[in-house]
Image (cartoon, rainbow, N blue to C red):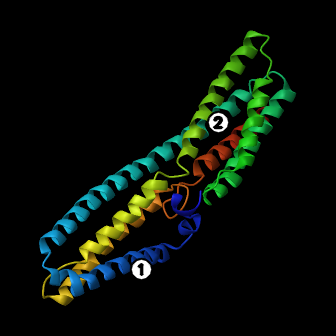
Amino acid sequence: QTGFQTMPAAFYNLHVLTALLLIYLFFGGIGFLGYQLNRRYFRKSNNLTLITTAQQTSLTFGTLFIAFWIALNWQTLDNLNVDSKNEAQAILSISSSANLIDSTAQQQTVKLAINDYLDSVIHQEYHSLEQGEVNQATDQKLTHLIQEVNLLPTKTLEQKIVYNKMLESLNGLVAFRLKRLDYAAGQINGVLLIFFVMLLMLICFWSACVNNNLKKLTILVIISQNLIILSSAWLILEIDRPFQGYFKVGNQAFVNIQKNIIVMENLRKNAK
């Protein structure tokens, strides 16, 4: 996606203060334009009622929109954490079931496929997600794991039980993985992103059209109001991409599972 369809990945690689400063400068410039136009033209045309209506409409709608998206995106972060842990647990379940495979060769092959996939998620996929991309190599690792599980024999009752148990965990893994990756693109994209930017521009423009004789106090109020609105806008953009930026959800759930698998494997070896 290019242009105004999505926020550039470079934005989420910026330091917090740098990103905030860019937002303040751009939309602050819009507010300064509104302030100057109001002083030179709007105030002289005696359209104070219309200006007040525009201010109230943009501020009320903008405040409600921002509050709604902050609440929604915080819930998204919580959901992503849960889905990541569930996916990691599904990997652990597949690994545990692999110990029940009667053929040593097939057992090692499946375990290798599991470890390759898990290692790819930790070291490749999350690196790509931080850049706003989906890693194709990890998809191939998952496909290979699915193929290896499907090659397991189902002649005896014990083999069928193991196969069905692994297949159930594998289906859960795929489902949770799809849910996790759905968060990567965020929700403020395309037309919604354009709408969000236009809304911020209108808020900053009309909120600067304040008509009174207290110039210094007016400027202070305008700046304070815009700082609140624009800081909230930055927060929305940051948490809209949960794999990027300051509030990103990392790969810790998968790292913990990888450690658990290594510990369990060492215990099995020592028990023999």
Q: Residues within 10 Å of mark 1 (few under 14, many from 20)?
A: few
Give the quarter of the figure containing the C terminus.
top right
Residue 270 is at least partly visible in this image: no
Residue occupying image coordinates x 68% and y 25%: 166
* Viewer-proximal residue among 91 and 8: 8
Q: Which amino acid lies under the numbered mark 1 shown in the image of this protein?
A: Leu
From the image, tell me which residue sits under label 1.
25
Q: From the viewer's perspective, tell me whether residue 44 is left or right of residue 32.
A: left
Nearer the N terminus, badge 1 or badge 2? 1
Residue occupying image coordinates x 59% and y 52%: 252
Q: Nearer the viewer, mark 1 or mark 2?
A: 1
User: Farthest residue toward the right?
Assistant: 105
Q: Residues within 10 Å of mark 2 (few under 14, many from 20)?
A: many
**x then y, percent, for residue 158:** 73, 14
62 relative to 135, above or below:
below
Give the number of the disc on residue 246: none
From the image, tell me which residue sits under label 2.
92
Local secondary structure at mark 2:
helix
Local secondary structure at mark 1:
helix
Residue 233 is at least partly visible in this image: yes
**x then y, percent, for residue 227:** 32, 74
Say which quarter of the image contains residue 53: bottom left
Distance, label 1 to label 2, CA atoms, is 48 Å
19 relative to 245, above or below:
below
**x then y, percent, for residue 67:** 30, 56
**x then y, percent, for residue 146:** 73, 31
Residue occupying image coordinates x 63% and y 34%: 174
Q: Which amino acid lies under the numbered mark 2 shown in the image of this protein?
A: Leu
